[in-house]
Image (cartoon, rainbow, N blue to C red):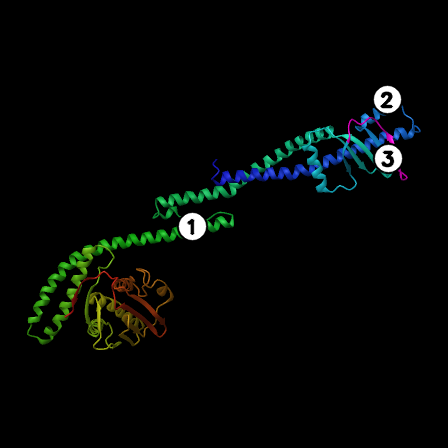
Amino acid sequence: MRLNTISGRFAVLTTMFVILAELFILLPSLAGFRLDYLESRLERAQIASLALLATDDSLASDLESELLQNAGVFNVVLRRNDIRQLVLSSPIPGPIAATYDLRSEGVLHTIDDSLGALANRQNRVIRVIGAPVNQAGQLIEITMETAPLRDAMIEYGLRLLAVSAAFSILTAVLLFLAAQRLILVPIRRVITHMTAYANAPEDARHIITPDARMAELNEAETALQSMQQTVTSSLKQKERMAQLGQAVAKISHDLRNILTTAQIFADRLEDSADPKVRRAAPKLVNSITRAVNLCETTLAFGKAEEPAPTLSRFNLAQLAAEVIEAEALASEAAGQVEFLTDIPPSLMIRADRDQLYRVLANLARNARQAIEGTSQPGTIEIGAGEGDSDWWIKICDTGPGLPDKAREYLFKPFTGSTRRGGTGLGLTIAADLVRGHGGKLELLRSDAEGSQFCIQIPRGMANVPARQEVMAQ
């Protein structure tokens, strides 16, 4: 058992407290024993003096010596009727070293005298004063040696230590066993669960089930269970996302080949004799080109991170018009959703055009689907402007607003979707793309009157690792 363990430290503390308890028991007991010892000598001396009083003050010297020896004193003095009388006497072997009046000693004073008696190994002569029993006078005074008192105190202390030590050791053992059962065993159980969970955190069978009876340990187990459930859920979600990434990479590989073929046929539509087809051909080609670039990007990186933005200067109003035109064509209920713009025609912005198109398209698509879900007419407005340090773009709608759960997990994949069957990836992708520009995407408001998102892109993006800047045509 090591001292740096709970068991070792508890054993040390228990030992220290047992020793402290022994001292608290031993000192008053020794003081009480000394007081009883002296009072018994006074009683014996009083009884011995009664023999002299009964014989009219005459006793043989040998009988007087025997009485004093049986009482354990050298002489006896009685005070009766304000007269001090030496009743029994014998030669004193030395000077009187101290006087103790038992009538006025307090508890602390008695303990101090007891310690002094034990510490002094010399056989001294002391005077002891006390009150006679049965009111047989005003006081009784004796002289006696300290050696028999000290020997009796040592013998009594050893017996007391032996008995109290036995009970203390038994108490300490019971306390130690109780602590082992009530505290250490549950703690070891928690440690065992933590170790097993650390070896296989994805295995839900290793999640602890709180069953401790002590409130503190139960709270600790409950907190551990909550943490393990959160970690396991996160690991499973990351595993699903990794599997999804692999699947997307495979799909992107085949989809790129399909879109490349579609791009070749779309290029030929520009030579069509139908003027409507010729006007629609460039837009179709641009859409297919964006899809091909997205597939190539997914294959190139093979992970969820987006590439660094390719910065270029372009007209934001034209980009917004393309997003609105695409969403208007994709609308399931023609005329139900009205698209508005509030962007200065000459506003030029420096960003990755394709990535910003994806951001606006995701936000506009979410707003359109929310309005269509109400079966009521609504409006989507894209506004923009510029300040001294950044460009800002706001997307507002008159939809039903976001529920509390969607706002709590707004930019987290697979958790923030409000549409049945949705994945919640749209806002996650949009937020990642904006962060890639050094900006931020935030929800300004969402209530019964609709929602409003704001995109902020800094004008100076010195900390953004961008690919070679090009000028948009």
Image quarter hosting the C terminus: bottom left
Is 236 placed above or below 319 here?
above
Q: In the rendered image, is residue 312 in sight?
A: yes
x and y percent of residue 216 in the render? 50, 50
Identify which residue is drawn at 59% across, 35% down. Answer: 170
* SS type, badge 3: strand
x and y percent of residue 367 in the render? 29, 71
Identify which residue is drawn at 35% across, 47% down. Answer: 201
Q: Which range of residues does the magenta coloring cover?
A: 79-95
User: In this view of the protein, which residue sits in the foreground, 43 or 418?
Assistant: 43
Report the amino acid beneath label 1: Leu
Left-right relation of 323 to 118:
left
Report the amino acid beneath label 3: Leu
Q: How many marks?
A: 3
To which residue does mark 1 refer?
A: 224
Circle number at residue 62: 2
x and y percent of residue 221 in the render? 45, 49
Give how far apart the Cα atoms at labels 2 and 3 are.
21 Å
To which residue does mark 3 refer?
A: 78
Q: In the rendered image, is residue 340 in sight?
A: no
Left-right relation of 127 to 322:
right
Circle number at residue 331: none
Is 408 placed above or below 47 here?
below
User: How many neighbours does mark 3 have within 10 angstroms: few (below 14), some (14-19), or many (20 or more)?
Assistant: many
Is 150 placed above or below 336 here?
above
